[in-house]
Amino acid sequence: MPTVEMERRQVVVIGAGPSGAIAAALLKRKGHDVLMIERQHFPRFSIGESLLSHCLDFVEEAGMLEAVNAAGFQMKNGAAFAWGEHYSAFDFGDTFSNGKPTTFQVQRADFDKLLADQAALQGVDVRYGEAIVSADFDLPKPQLDVLREDGSQYRVEADFVLDASGYGRVLPRLLDLEAPSNFPVRQAVFTHIEDHIDSPTFEREKILITTHPTHRDIWFWTIPFSNGRCSVGVVAAAEHFEGRMENLDECLRGFIAETPSLAGVLKNAVWDTPARTIGGYSANVKTLHGPGFALLGNAAEFLDPVFSSGVTIAMRSASMAAGVLHRQLQGESVDWQTEFAAPLKRGVDTFRCYVEGWYAGTFQDVIYHPDSSADIRRMISAILAGYAWDERNPFVSEPKRRLRVLSELCARDVT
């Protein structure tokens, strides 16, 4: 038997996306030895381009805010919603939670590389082009087998492993942790365009969410960047795409043509990038943690892109896990269920309630109501800004009951 090349590290982070970079930097700042392993090379394309305000709290915590502020990304101050003649805008500078008033809309290739580079500058050992091919957590310390691009392998032993692999979901696959999502299978078709938007109703400082005029479960994102380009996508249940998927560009532009308000905004666009698709992206796991590991962000659970909650959940999970793990590595007794999984899940479940309400139409009734009170709008705006863990907010502490009551009041006025 050939000798296996062996390496010993304190913490291994799988994946160099936002949750990995934040977690790795936070642990390094606490004095821990951190190795971050990434299968791809950066920069690389990813969706999830409209950040929520709460994201910047974690960017700041990880010592990266100055670099992000200086990078020239498109400033974002809120979210706008359009459905036929209805238009409703929410300002992140006026929220119940009084969080950060602005954030950014980013091309993720640039943003993710910036965060990973910042983690490396802080001393994190970052390796690209390496894949985790097996994992053993039955040993006294976890061991991972890593495949390099040249075909060689090595084994790394760690005190703890954080899986921030996103859609790759490395440990859920290797450890049989995958669980079915309770969300219907939905598909997204999307592209980047040179937008040439001159509509007086369009605000580049906001993401625009547009509801299809006749199918309220079909919606579009329009995310403007600082370089005159936009990310544009349509999301719908699988059956709405039947007969449309042979040509993705025609598919996306066909849905937009059915939606006059959005077609008007994009009337001057240059469609210069082939459309892509992703489907069946909602995912879940049996557990968020186990002996020697914890799952972060999309590696654990991904809901739906409608409120851009994915990166926020990822960064929140990174911050929470880094805090618990630091204490564990210091020799303290910690409870990953009560200190990480349960509190993380409360915010995820809040987002889930409003995602489900969006597709059921009840949350849309609230969003598009012409006479919502200022106080209610501030509470809703706080959730849209990412503060889904602020249980002082009644729409966070009791999301299902509050949404049900409010939607019943609003429904008769939104037609």
Image: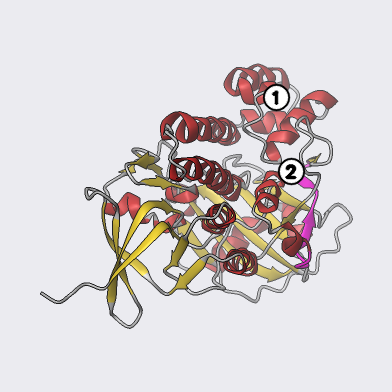
Judging depth in this view, the residue of 256 and 208 nearest the camera is: 208
Question: Whole-percent x and y of residue 364?
Answer: 67, 33
**Amino acid beneath label 2:** Phe
Labels 1 and 2: the sequence-earlier one: 2
252 or 288, which is in the foreground? 288
- The residue tagged 1 is 393
- Check the image and report above or below for 107 versus 172: below
Q: Please report the residue visible at 52 percent of the width from the left and 35 percent of the height from the top.
A: 344
Render colour scheme: secondary structure
Quadrant in which the N terminus appears:
bottom left
The foreground one among 73 and 145 is 145
What's the residue type where badge 1 is placed?
Answer: Asn
When asked about the image quadrant of residue 363, the answer is top right
Circle 2 packing at 10 Å, graded few (<14), some (14-19), many (20+), is many
Judged from this view, the residue extending furthest toward the left is: 1
Helix, strand or loop at mark 2: strand
User: Residue 223 has which mark?
Assistant: none
Magenta highlight on residue 104: no
Indicate yes or no whether the magenta region holds residue 71. yes
Q: How many marks?
A: 2
Q: Looking at this rendering, what residue extends furthest in the front direction?
A: 331
Q: In the rendered view, would you say 383 is above or below 111?
A: above
Tell me where the magenta segment starts and ends, as one range. Answer: 70-86
Residue that mark 2 sits on? 81
Tell me the CA gap for discs 1 and 2: 22 Å
Comparing labels 1 and 2, the label whose residue is closer to the camera: 1
Q: Give the vertical position of 215 relative to 235 (above or below).
A: above
Residue at left offset 55%, top offset 62%: 251
In the figure, 147 relative to 238: above or below? below
Q: Quadrant of the C terminus?
A: top right
